[in-house]
Image (spheres, rainbow, N blue to C red):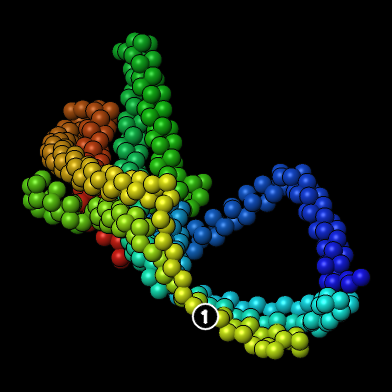
Amino acid sequence: MTRSSETLTHRTGGRALAAATLVFSLAAALGGCSAGDADQLRGDHARRLSDELARRAAATLPQGRPASLDDCLRIALANNLDVRAAGIQARLATLDRKIAFANFLPQIDLSWNYRETHDPVMTNAGGRFIQTSDRCVWNVAAAAQQPVFAPQTWFLYAAYQKGERIAELVRRRTGQLIALRTTALYYACLSQDEAAAHLRRRLDESRALLDETAALEREGLALPADRQAAEAMVLGRRRAVDDNDRARRQARAELLETLGLSPLGSFDLAAAPSGAAEPPAGDVADQALEALLHRPELFAADRTVEIRRDEVRMAIAAFLPVVGAFGSYDHSSNSYLKFADTWTYGASAVLAVFDGFADIHRYRAARQRQAAAFLQREQACLTVMLEVVAARRQLDDAADALAVAAATRVAAEARLKNVEAQWREGLIDVSSRLAALADRDAAVAAEAAAQYHRQVAAATLIDVMGMTPLKEHEQQ
């Protein structure tokens, strides 16, 4: 009775199964231990994250000077998690395109196998048993396949090329949005700082008024209710200062998070840059046209329409045959073979004759998706135009508010000059002078806030027009 390598395979297969069972058992045991150490794992990650964020802050934030807007933009575009995730998606799209290109190249497979039997392989031939193979045989084979006519592959590769471009446009748009958010938070922090100085001046004014009212009450020239009202004013303005401190910390935390740094950190900001970027001149119609020509989303919508066209072509190509060529070479050590080397080559063609009308319905579905892509692109265009209208309105409102704030500041400075002159002549008390100072400081802070608001509005209009500059801040 002949015993072939199947017996050996059965024995070695049993050993392999036992070894695999042992490995899976150990893995399950280790997995159970890991589940029990979930708290330790979470703690280790939290500590590593804190160390990493501290290291990142030390490496990116400027040392020895306040951070400017350019510094914040550079750090955000390098560290923001949304920007980094968009970059990963863009690189994945490039890899997908390269993988799709492999469909045009020949597929080559190499194989080697060895077979051994315990007894010679015998075949019954007319009542006699004749050996037909050596006990030990090894084989080497090489096979190659090359598509010759596969139109679906061409359209698929074209779609991946356009998908790569879409991913790059998404990455760029993500960077623009993060740049806008960074700019808005930067000016929000500066506005909070301006408000802090004004609120502290108001608090000092109310404290001086309380001291004067208490002195007048001791002289019998003021009622206790007047002193209580002054005390309530001090408490209210102290609360306003505390609220502002909390708002400043929150604004800085949001800015740090946008920069990809720990929200628990702290840093100083430089004064607002002079000569902030301004949107192109022109009316709303001109700016809307510029947006239609520059917004990355609309370029991505164009690529999506082209991808849907490629899908229609792919659906049509499904009705065509797929033609390919193949070839292989085999070599065997079996001495009983007359020809140890064998060459095989040929061609193949596959044509789906009937697949339950699936290809017809796929073609119709592709046409509908193409029509939907046209509608989505048109909807995106209308949305962009509406965003331009809203952003232009915000810019005009901010410009008007800045003009009013500037006029108010000029009037407050003129009044302060008169009050200072009267105070030097002894005609008014300290609280009246402090009130005039506080009014002037409030007007200055309001003008600064209006200036920040206008700069944010201008940056917003530039963003919705798709013209936010990134190259000088991007780190490739």
Does 19 appear above or below 145? above
Q: Residue at x 81, y 83 (%)?
A: 134
Q: Nearer the viewer, residue 116 or 65?
A: 116
Query: Tag 1's secondary structure?
Result: strand
Position of residue 312 in the picture relative to residue 136 (left or right): left
Does 41 appear above or below 227? below
Q: Residues within 10 Å of mark 1 (few under 14, many from 20)?
A: few
Quadrant of image for the N terminus: bottom right
Position of residue 19 in the picture relative to residue 275 (left or right): right
Q: Residue at x 13, y 39 (%)?
A: 400
Q: Position of residue 249 (x, y in %)?
A: 44, 41
* Residue holding disc 1: 345
Q: Nearer the viewer, residue 368 or 279?
A: 368
Q: Position of residue 305 (x, y in %)?
A: 27, 53
Q: Nearer the viewer, residue 181 or 251?
A: 181
Position of residue 187 in the picture relative to residue 356 (left or right): left
Q: Residue at x 83, y 82 (%)?
A: 131
Does 214 appear above or below 66? above
Position of residue 106 in the picture relative to residue 213 (left or right): right
Res 331 seen here = yes
Residue type beneath disc 1: Tyr
Does 105 appear above or below 418? below
Q: Residue at x 89, y 72 (%)?
A: 2
